[in-house]
Amino acid sequence: MIREVGPACEQEGPDPSRSIAARLARLEANNAVRAVATRYFRLCDALGPTTQMDELGDLFAQDAVWEGKGRYEEAFGRHEGRDAILAMLGSYATSGHFILNAHYLTSEDIVILDDRTAMASWQMLQVSTYHDGKSDFRSASLNLEFAVRDGSWRITRFVTQAIFSRAVGPWNDDTAISVPTASTITLENEDTEK
């Protein structure tokens, strides 16, 4: 979803006085912001010794802030500056902390404030299995701010606040995946013919 802010946005529908170029620039900004967030989580899904930490760092402005709120305040703390953020994220990468990690984002709301700044929020679900064999299922509210720095959209503020967390059994096991076989397909076809 793309939302605009300011007095010109109080009317219904797109402002016909805005140029197509300006509207296109806003769409491109929206997609760029989404791409930065998506890349961050894809890298975090595979966070480990082979993670390209330079690429992860490039997603943040030099003066960015990353912080946990609520239950996450104690767990993750607050990190100011790209180097501090990378040190925190790097501690998960070098320790082999995750065996399995997957983030799912929903309820996206991106607001392009102007041609150089934006804010966005998502609801996140995360499933993880850790090196100690424990697994959990979590949800968090994410609020991010972005700005164009050095010619690219970058995260300037990343806030994650826990909604819930629940310990679960292992997410992945060796159970065979159920797929149709020739005999089950034949039986199903026979049943429908009767």
Image (spheres, helix red, strand yellow):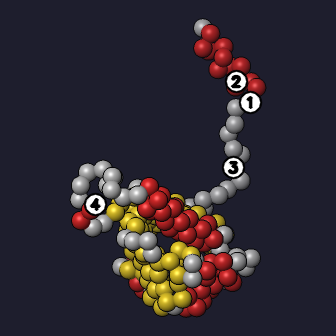
Residue 119: horizontal and vertical position, in percent? Answer: 40, 71
- Which is nearer the N-term, disc 4 or disc 2? 4
Nearer mark to the viewer, of 2 and 3: 2
The residue to which callout 4 is attached is: 9
Tell me if mark 3 has few (under 14), some (14-19) or many (20+) residues whose alpha carbon lies within 10 angstroms of its own: few
Which structural element holds mark 1? loop
Dot 1, how many residues are within 10 Å of its Cα: few (below 14), some (14-19), or many (20+)?
few
Real-space Cα distance between discs 2 and 3? 21 Å
Query: Quick check: 27 left or right of 181?
Result: left
What residue is drawn where x is 24% and y is 65%? 7
Is residue 88 something that shows in the picture?
Answer: no
Q: CA distance from mark 4 to mark 1?
A: 56 Å
Q: Horizontal placement of 83 versus 123: left or right?
A: right
Q: Which residue is mark 2?
A: 185
Task: Judge whether 25 appears above or below 84 on screen.
Answer: above
Secondary structure category for the residue under label 4? helix
- Mark 3 is on which residue type? Thr
User: CA–CA distance between discs 1 and 3?
Assistant: 17 Å
x and y percentages locating residue 104 in the rendered image:
52, 60
Q: Are marks 1 and 3 in contact (CB under 8 Å)?
A: no
- In the image, what residue type sits under mark 1? Thr
**Marks 4 and 1, the one that precedes in the sequence:** 4
Look at label 2 and name its amino acid.
Ile
Q: Quadrant of residue 103?
A: bottom right
Which mark is in front, 3 or 4?
4
Q: Which residue is mark 1?
A: 181
Neighbours of disc 2 within 10 Å: few (<14), some (14-19), many (20+): few
- Helix, strand or loop under label 3: loop
Quadrant of the image containing the N terminus: bottom left
Which one is in front in this view, the residue at disc 4 or the one at disc 1?
4
Residue that carries the numbered disc 3 in the rendered image: 175
